[in-house]
Image (cartoon, grey):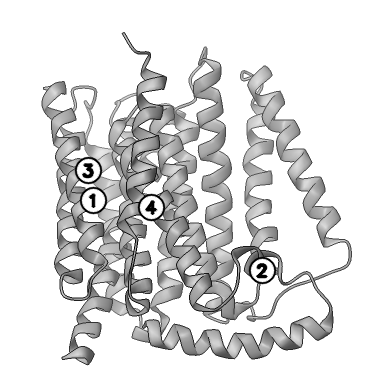
Amino acid sequence: MNTFIQFAFVVSAALFIFGLKQLGSPDTARRGNMVSALGMLIAVVAALLHQGIVEYQWILIGFAVGGAIGASAARLVKMTSMPEMVALFNGFGGMASLLVGWAALAPGAGTFTLVTVLLSILIGGLTFTGSLIAYGKLSENLGSGAVLFKGQQIVNSIIVAAILGSAVMFCLEPANHTWLYLVICLALVFGVMAVIPIGGADMPVVISLLNSYSGLAACAAGFAVDNNILIVAGSLVGASGIILTQIMCKAMNRSLANVLFGGFGSVERRNRGEIRGRDQADHRRRCL
Amino acid sequence: MIPAEVFLTFILMLSIFLGFELIHKVPATLHTPLMSGANAISGITVVGAISLAGTGQQDLSNWLGAGAVALASINVVGGYLVTDRMLAMFKKREG
């Protein structure tokens, strides 16, 4: 049975690859999406057949709740606000990877597992809050301007240092859950700090990047729970997301570094940014 | 026997190259649907969540797994449906 499940995962990985390939050209794009959805269905059914699963109740409740929310959100969202909806969905995917990584933490785990748990928590957490901020900016619930304050870079450096510190402590003392909670909180804070200095017009690029991160988070979670399909699909999304982000930056004649750190500048640069912002809004409309 | 970590890292490396190759020359009009479609695939984490939510042990892992199933289902179901809506609209405008 286990071998059968693994082969089913191989089939669904192939379908994801075909799906992504077809999504890349206008004639086949819609079919590509269906092919990829079929791959997901096969993977989910195969996972349900696993012998280790003895209780279906919570899985089904999870499906029902998540499926209902996802389906109604996708059905009800206005055509013009789809990019922010994608951001929101992406955030939930990141959070799911965080939870999977956390749940995979068992007493006596080896260093390799601990590191993958850490990575899925860090990447998943920053994807979650980063995507929520991106959603807020695009839907203009938060105001779309770049949020900048004095000493922001210093604060960010302190957060990064604290993440590294608590990550090392977590690997040294995995039984002490204080470090785990600290890493989770810091990852969530870091996601907010990474996205607030970026203006609303740049959000599509940021969402694409966060999408890539959520793939990497799924990949890390795959290492943590020893699951091939998570690793394959996660790294596919991670890699294609990065390259797509770069293509989108190029279409706006900017570098990725400029989008991510361009907010840290003088007022003069911000004015130029507004003009660019208009170009990008045009670009976004063309993309839609 | 190759250690599992090495084997999995091999898979990771090959998938990364494949991901780069797949998204080669994509027209700008397809950027958003492609991003959305890839986003739906990243909901694959639901498969990992399923194995944690079905252990039948009423412990923290089980609850975290159940939460992850719900969140990842939002990503999967919503992601595919939104992508399909985008592409449907796109087709109409082109034709």
Q: Which of A60 and A280 is in front in this view?
A: A280
The total number of labels drawn is: 4
Q: Residues within 10 Å of mark 3 (few under 14, many from 20)?
A: many
- Subunit bearing disc 2: A
Comparing A218 with A179, the one in front is A218
Q: Earlier in the sequence, mark 3 or mark 2?
A: 3
Q: Label 3, label 2: how many angstroms apart (C-alpha)?
A: 34 Å
Kindly identify which chain the residue marked by label 4 belongs to: B
- Answer whether labels 4 and 1 touch (C-beta < 8 Å): no
Asked if badges 2 and 1 are on one and the same chain, I answer yes
Q: Residue furthest right?
A: A150
Name the element at disc 4: helix
* Tag nearer the camera, 3 or 2: 2
User: Which mark, residue A17?
Assistant: 1
Q: Which residue is drawn at 77% across and 39% down?
A: A162
Q: Is residue A278 left or right of residue A26?
A: right
Residue type at the position of mark 1:
Ile
Q: Are marks 4 and 1 on the same chain?
A: no
* Position in image of residue A186 (x %, y %): 69, 45
Q: What residue is pinned by disc 4? A: B20
> Quick one: SS at disc 2?
helix
Chain on which label 1 sits: A
Q: Please rate how many residues cluster around mark 4, counting C-alpha atoms within 10 Å: few if below 14, some from 14 to 19, many from 20.
A: some
| Quarter of the rendering occupied by the C terminus of chain A | bottom left
